[in-house]
Image: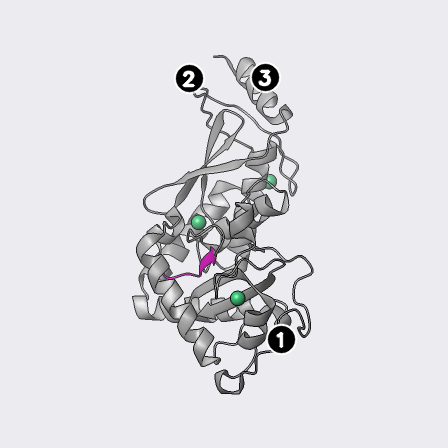
Amino acid sequence: MGEAESKAALAGVYSQGKEPRLVSVSDTGFDEAWAIGNTLFIIPAIPTGAPALLEYALRVRREATFTGNCSVCGATVGTLTFGRGNMPFSHSSIPHRNNCPALDANITPQLVEHYRDRSGQTLEQQLKSATMQTRLKMQSMPEENRIPIKNAGFGKWASEFIDARLKDSSACGHLKGDVAQTWNMSTGDRSWKCNECFAYYQELVRKGEALLSYEEEHTCDHCRLFAPPLETVMIRVDNFYIVGGMCSQCSAESQQPAKSIQRPPRGKKGKRRGKNGRKRR
Ligand SMILES: [Zn+2]
Ligand SMILES: [Zn+2]
Ligand SMILES: [Zn+2]
């Protein structure tokens, strides 16, 4: 396929207006395969704990790959080589300007340095920093949705829930490639996701493209009663972050120290948490 045809083919991909979908993550966790329509793009993953500038550069590069234009330097998609199989593939080359952060020559040394720094840390150091990042993430959430981990009953429940899910649930390729990061789970979906995959999943939920059964969507994670509407709750244990839904009674109890629990009569509850009583925020 000649260059002009390649360009035309890629223009066709972008003009489909299809959302990019994450297809897979390499075993190392370094690369991701994304599809737009029937075209696959391989791009570098945004590594956990990346310095802000590196993360920014990778996001600009990713956005340019997905749209065909760079929002920073204005470059548009250039020469491409298409494969001849059923699935067309392109060496997407966007000629970013020399001062553009998304230029590979600018990104690569930073990526190499980041992975080298990280491999110089012990797993314990990495996990400690992952726990700190997860705590900060939790603190950025609305206070009324957070379950304080000091509530002994709910802290224990969450630890047991996490242990069970570590045995029976899948994890995204990024987590498999680098375990020392935040492990996110929506109780309705029950698969472990890194921050990036979790944000992507939540976006699908927001658009109504990731649906649960009606029954699961309205079943309290704690007492397992079908009790719509549920209240959105979040709990963190170390570097594990769980988002779920609880009935008003369980969620009221989760806010109190375990000993002083007084069950309010059903239906008469205190402050409502989420406006939208469904799981998977
Ligand atoms: Zn650029
Ligand atoms: Zn992931
Ligand atoms: Zn409940």
* Residue 111 included in the magenta stretch of the image: no
* Vertical order, 11 against 229 (above or below): above
Q: How far, Cα to Cα, is label 3 from label 2?
A: 18 Å
Label 1 packing within 10 angstroms: few (<14), some (14-19), many (20+): few
Q: How far, Cα to Cα, is label 1 from label 2?
A: 62 Å
Which mark's residue is nearer the viewer, 3 or 1? 1
Check contact, mark 3 vs mark 1: CB within 8 A.
no
Q: Secondary structure at mark 3?
A: helix
Disc 1 target residue: 265
Numbered tag placed on residue 8 in the rendering = 3
Residue at figure coordinates x 64%, y 28% from the top left: 17
Which mark's residue is nearer the viewer, 3 or 2? 2
Residue 68, image x, y percentages: 60, 31
* Residue 183 included in the magenta stretch of the image: yes
Amino acid type of the residue tagged 3 in the rendering:
Ala
Label 3 packing within 10 angstroms: few (<14), some (14-19), many (20+): few
* Vertical order, 5 against 80 (above or below): above
Disc 2 target residue: 86
225 horizontally vs 157: left or right:
right
Residue 201, image x, y percentages: 53, 47
Considering the image in quadrants, where does the C terminus appear? bottom right
Does the image show residue 6? yes
Rendering quarter of residue 158: bottom left
